[in-house]
Amino acid sequence: MLDFSGRKVLVVGGSSGIGNGVAQAFRAAGAEVSIWGTRPTASDYDGVEGSDLTGLAYTQVDVADRAAIDRATADITELDVLVLCQGTVRYKRQEFEREGWDDVMDVNINSVMDVARALKPALQARGGSMIIVSSVAGFGATIGTPAYSASKHAAVGLTKTLGAAWASDGIRVNGLAPGLVETKLTHVTTKNEKRLAGALRGIPQGRMGTPQDMAGVVMFLASPLASYVTGQTIIADGGLTLQ
Ligand SMILES: NC(=O)c1ccc[n+]([C@@H]2O[C@H](COP(=O)([O-])OP(=O)(O)OC[C@H]3O[C@@H](n4cnc5c(N)ncnc54)[C@H](OP(=O)(O)O)[C@@H]3O)[C@@H](O)[C@H]2O)c1
């Protein structure tokens, strides 16, 4: 196990799914972990599948609201690890319309840069590391969700550019591109028997990923084991994109 004792970690989108798994893994490794989510209070996640806020410091921040990001980051002066795991998608062709497009771009990419920009001084103060969670959708087409795909391609690109731009400031920037992980974002596939069977056939490892699988990659990237790695996005998809 990696040891993050005494480290300050913030997971944006840490209230559920992959981000929650990442947050709990850092907590188990000794870190002081803060998370952001959309609900008013931590207790609003009680009993919610995929959400365990035990031992995590929760703040409600709608990342589509730039003023809310400014308020939430104003007092953060030191940070060792920033994980940007917020994400959303709109199905039923909504992303082909301007409103759906804007909603997804605001959360999936604009807010990534907004939070990164606001917390750069705090990361620099600790020689910290940032991990941007994109997707395998950042490497190919997703026919029904153009904003999701475009935002994730942008996240992969931003990871490279910030990795290069902030290296001389002592900040490493890397990315995780998950394949299929069962969370509320993917229920449209995972709760549909036929679709799930089809999806699993395309995964050489023959199973979905778990938030814990994803946490392992994020922790590696944030750890000294990855001290000479920056600007890279690691695909963790059980081999989905190999064929
Ligand atoms: N699951 C997969 O198969 C998969 C695959 C590839 C990439 N990803 C990426 O992994 C990341 C996490 O997704 P997930 O699958 O774990 O889904 P999830 O369980 O829905 O988690 C999404 C997180 O983002 C937060 N969020 C959404 N909109 C927000 C907003 N406007 N302001 C603040 N927070 C907001 C959610 O808060 P609430 O908890 O309050 O809703 C939640 O914490 C996303 O970037 C997603 O694109 C997931």
Image: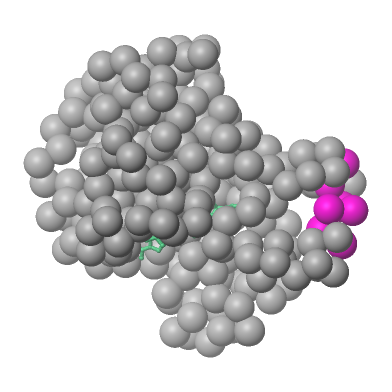
Q: Which residue shows up at 63% across the image and 84% down it?
A: 92
User: Which quadrant holds residue 71?
Assistant: bottom left
Residue 239 placed where, x, y %?
Answer: 81, 40
Q: Residue furthest left?
A: 75
Q: Residue at x 44, y 84 (%)?
A: 99
- Does the image show residue 17? yes
Range of magenta residues: 198-204
Asked whether residue 231 is in view, the answer is no
Q: Position of residue 232 (x, y in %)?
A: 57, 32
In this rendering, position of residue 133 left or right of residue 168: right
Q: Which colour scheme is used?
A: one colour
Left or right: residue 114 compared with residue 163: left
Q: In this view, does 241 lie above or below 101?
A: above
Q: Residue at x 69, y 76 (%)?
A: 144
Residue 35, position in %: x, y? 31, 45
Q: Observer-nearest residue: 237 or 131?
A: 237
Q: Is residue 140 above or below residue 118?
A: below
The verdict on residue 203 being magenta is yes
Viewer-proximal residue among 57 and 115: 57
The front one of 230 and 14 is 14
In screen coordinates, is 138 left or right of 49? right
Q: Is residue 220 rendered magenta in the image?
A: no
Pick the residue in front: 4 or 119.
4
Q: Which residue is drawn at 35% across and 57% down?
A: 45
Residue 128 position in % (x across, y down): 32, 24
Q: Count numbered badges in the picture.
A: 0
162 lies above or below 168:
below
Residue 124 against residue 196 in the figure, above or below: above
